[in-house]
Amino acid sequence: MWKVITGFVAAVLAASSCLAADLTEIEVRWLKGVWPVVVFAHTAKLPLDIIVQPQATPGAAPLALGFIDGRCKLVLSMRGNSEAQATLDRIEPDLLDATLELMAAHELGHCHRYLEGSWLSLPAGFAASEPAGLSANLRESYRNMKAVRLEEGYADLVGLAWARQHHRQKHQRLLTWLIAERSRDLIPGSHHDTLAWIQMAGDGNALIRPSIFAAAAALWDAGLAAADPWSEP
C-alpha cells in the first residue's frame, strides 16, 4: 500500500482527467477523506495534482504518488481493485477520515522529498553500508530496497505528524492502526518495514513542530543515528 509511482506515460495521465460526474462512489469517498491534505498542499504551494485512473487496476495500491515534470501526482487506482474497499473495511468507521488523511500526508512526505531533490538519499552525515560478497546486481537491488525503506519510514512519520497536529485525540488509535498495517504480511527489512520509526513516534510529543516535514525529519534522523541505516533500525 502507498507505493511510489515514477513511470507514468503522458497518455495515461491524459486519459485520467475524469470529471466529477464520472467518479465512482468509492473514489468520491477516498477523495473526501484525503481532501484536507490536498487543501493543505495547495495552501503551502506544493505542486500537487490528483489523477483518478479510469481503467481497471487490480493489484495496484489504491493511493500512490507519482512525480512528473516537477509536479507531484496523487494517484487513485480504485477501479477493478478490491483493495480500495478492503482498505476502508480495515479502518474503524470513526477513524476513517483521519486515517485517509494520514495516508495522504504520507504521500505528501514523498512529494516533499522529491521536491527537495533528496529522494533516495541519506541526510548529511550518514553513510551507507552493505553486506560483503554481494554481486553487482544484488548490491544494486539491496541498496535500492533499503533506500526505499528509508523513504517509507520518513513518509510514515509525516503521516503521524499530520495525525498529531490535526487529530490529537485520535493519535494513539491512528498509531495503532498504522502499526497493524505495517505488520500485515511483514517481511523484515523490506520496503515497508517501517515499524522501528513508527514506534519511535510514541505518544506523538516528539512530532510537535510547526512543520510536519521538519517534525518527521527530526525523528527520522534520530532513528538513523541509532543504527546503521541499511540494517534494521
Image (cartoon, rainbow, N blue to C red):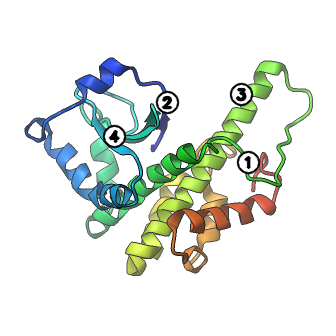
Q: Which mark is residue 27?
A: none
Q: Real-space Cα distance between discs 2 and 1?
A: 20 Å
Res 26 quadrant in image: top left
Q: Which mark is residue 83?
A: 4
Q: Real-space Cα distance between discs 3 and 4?
A: 27 Å
Q: Which mark is residue 6?
A: 2
N-terminal of the pair, mark 2 or mark 1, is 2
Q: Real-space Cα distance between discs 4 and 1?
A: 32 Å
Residue pushed farthest left?
21
The C terminus lies in which quarter of the figure? bottom right
Q: Residue at x 27, y 57 (%)?
A: 35
Q: Is residue 125 left or right of residue 26?
A: right
Q: Real-space Cα distance between discs 3 and 2?
A: 17 Å
Say whether residue 89 is visible.
Answer: yes
Give the image location of residue 139, x and y in percent.
Answer: 80, 27
Which amino acid does the dot numbered 2 rest on? Thr
Residue pushed farthest right?
132
Q: Which mark is residue 141?
A: 3
Q: Residue at x 22, y 56 (%)?
A: 32
Which amino acid does the dot numbered 1 rest on? Leu
Q: Is residue 55 left or right of residue 172?
A: left
Compared to residue 125, the image places residue 136 above or below, namely: above
Compared to residue 149, the image places residue 13 above or below, namely: above
Number of other residues with Cα within 10 Å of mark 1, as a class: few under 14, some 14 to 19, many 20 or more: some
- Front residue of 54/68: it is 68
N-terminal of the pair, mark 4 or mark 1, is 4
Tell whether label 1 touches label 4 (CB within 8 Å). Answer: no
Q: Residue at x 33, y 28 (%)?
A: 58
Say whether residue 179 is visible.
Answer: no
Q: On the image, numbered disc 1 is attached to which residue?
A: 122
